[in-house]
Structure formats: C-alpha cells, structure tokens
C-alpha cells in the first residue's frame, strides 16, 4: 500500500500518524491560570529534547480552532508540570481529556489531589509516580493546523521512593501507560535486553550497524 498525504485532510493524516507512531508516552500536564484554576490534560505527542539542560517538549494542537487551555496557561505563566502516570491511572488520564470550560479545574472534577510546585507556580499531581517541574524555553509553530511545540526546561524532578537508584529509573516499577491509535492505551508489556552496542565485537560475523 502507498499513501500520498498531499490530498488528505489533516484529521485523516492525524489518524494515520497516531496509528503508526506507537507506542507514545503520555505527558499528563498540569498548568494554572492567572485566576488560580488548575488545568490537567494528557498529551501523547511528547518527548525529551535535551539532557543538559534537561528539556522536554509537548505538541499542543487547537480545539475547534481555539487555543487549548494548556497552551494558553503555559504561554502566559511560562510554568508547567509534566506528570507521568502508571497503568492504574488510565481511566483518570482518559477522562482528563474531556473538554471543560476554562474556569473549571479537571483536578477538582476528577478528585485528584495536588501538591504545590517547589520551583514553579504550578501544582503537581500527588498520585503521580513521576513529576517534572518545567519552565518554558521555546514555543514553536509547526504546520498549518495551529499546533505549537512547547519546550520546557526541567528545573526539578520528583520521583516516588524506590523508583530510582543511581539516577536509573526502574521502568518495571514505574509501570507507565502509553497511547496507541484511537482511544486506545497499552501497558509496558515484555521487556528484553541486548548487549550494549559498545560491547559488541565488530568482526564480519557479528557487526552491528
């Protein structure tokens, strides 16, 4: 099968890409309005973009042609927190994607406890095994659909006790949830290890490209 994206509608290309680029980690983002209303929303177009300084990025599209609350709050306050949920929180993650008026807090609707940030003005989710306090460093427009890629510098990491040793996270203990195509989610599944590439011999029979 060959698919030419040129004549396709944006929503059809989106459906195609979100089925191909899988699995995707989920950034469960808390932001806060000038009036103090805490917004919570999930974003699976999410990655880290730098390790020194540590920086993560989320892509925020439009909703019905309007800027989403998350982007609005981040661009105004320059602060946000990326929370990482585990598989027990899947339903809460999904429901936090429901659209609410700007003056309604998803954390209140879902009954989720928050904890004040240490270096940013935004609270984090108390139940999240990992939270990253971020300060906005870049906002970049991509494409013709109004998407904004927001890059924040992580100024504080919060990890549940027992998850990290010598700066290495125990992924099995974290039990992260990921997004796949459509309204579908997945757990971590099988984990298997291979030799470090630097330790692999480079002879003709076992060369690693």
Image: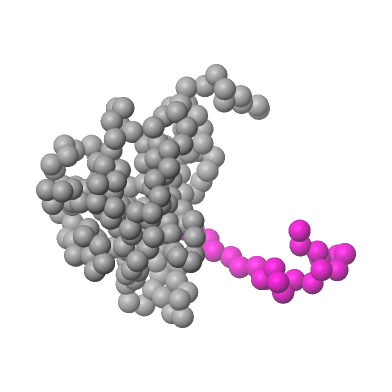
Q: Is residue 88 left or right of residue 50?
A: left
At horizontal 21% and vertical 60% (from top left) the residue drawn is 121
Q: Is residue 135 left or right of residue 46?
A: left
**Which residue sits furthest bottom?**
166
Q: Most prominent secondary structure in the magenta stretch?
A: loop
| Residue in the foreground of this view, choosing between 159 and 86 | 159
Q: How many marks?
A: 0
At horizontal 28% and vertical 30% (from top left) the residue drawn is 66
Q: Is residue 162 left or right of residue 105?
A: right
Quadrant in which the C terminus is drawn: bottom right
Instruction: Using the image, determine if residue 58 lies above or below residue 201.
Output: above
Instruction: Using the image, determine if residue 25 lies above or below residue 146.
Output: below
Q: Quadrant of residue 156?
A: bottom left
User: What's the magenta region?
Assistant: 185-209
Q: Is residue 109 visible?
A: no
At horizontal 39% and vertical 60% (from top left) the residue drawn is 153
Q: Position of residue 13 (x, y in %)?
A: 50, 29
């Amino acid at each position: 099968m060959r698919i030419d994206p040129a004549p396709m509608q944006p929503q059809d290309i989106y459906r195609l890409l979100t089925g191909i680029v899988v699995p995707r980690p989920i950034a469960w983002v808390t932001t806060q309005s000038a009036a103090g209303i805490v917004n919570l929303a999930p974003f699976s177009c999410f990655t880290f973009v730098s390790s020194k300084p540590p920086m993560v990025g989320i892509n925020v599209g439009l909703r019905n042609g309007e800027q989403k609350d998350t982007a609005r709050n981040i661009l105004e306050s320059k602060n946000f927190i990326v929370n990482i949920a585990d598989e027990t929180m899947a339903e809460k993650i999904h429901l936090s994607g429901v659209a609410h008026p700007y003056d309604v807090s998803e954390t209140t609707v879902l009954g989720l406890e928050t904890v004040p940030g240490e270096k940013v003005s935004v609270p984090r989710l108390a139940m999240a095994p990992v939270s990253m306090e971020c300060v906005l460093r870049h906002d970049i427009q991509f494409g013709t659909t109004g998407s904004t890629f927001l890059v924040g510098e992580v100024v504080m990491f919060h990890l549940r006790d027992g998850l990290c040793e010598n700066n290495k996270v125990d992924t099995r203990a974290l039990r992260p949830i990921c997004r796949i195509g459509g309204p579908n989610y997945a757990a971590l599944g099988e984990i298997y290890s291979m030799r470090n590439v630097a330790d692999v011999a480079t002879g003709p029979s076992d060369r690693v490209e």
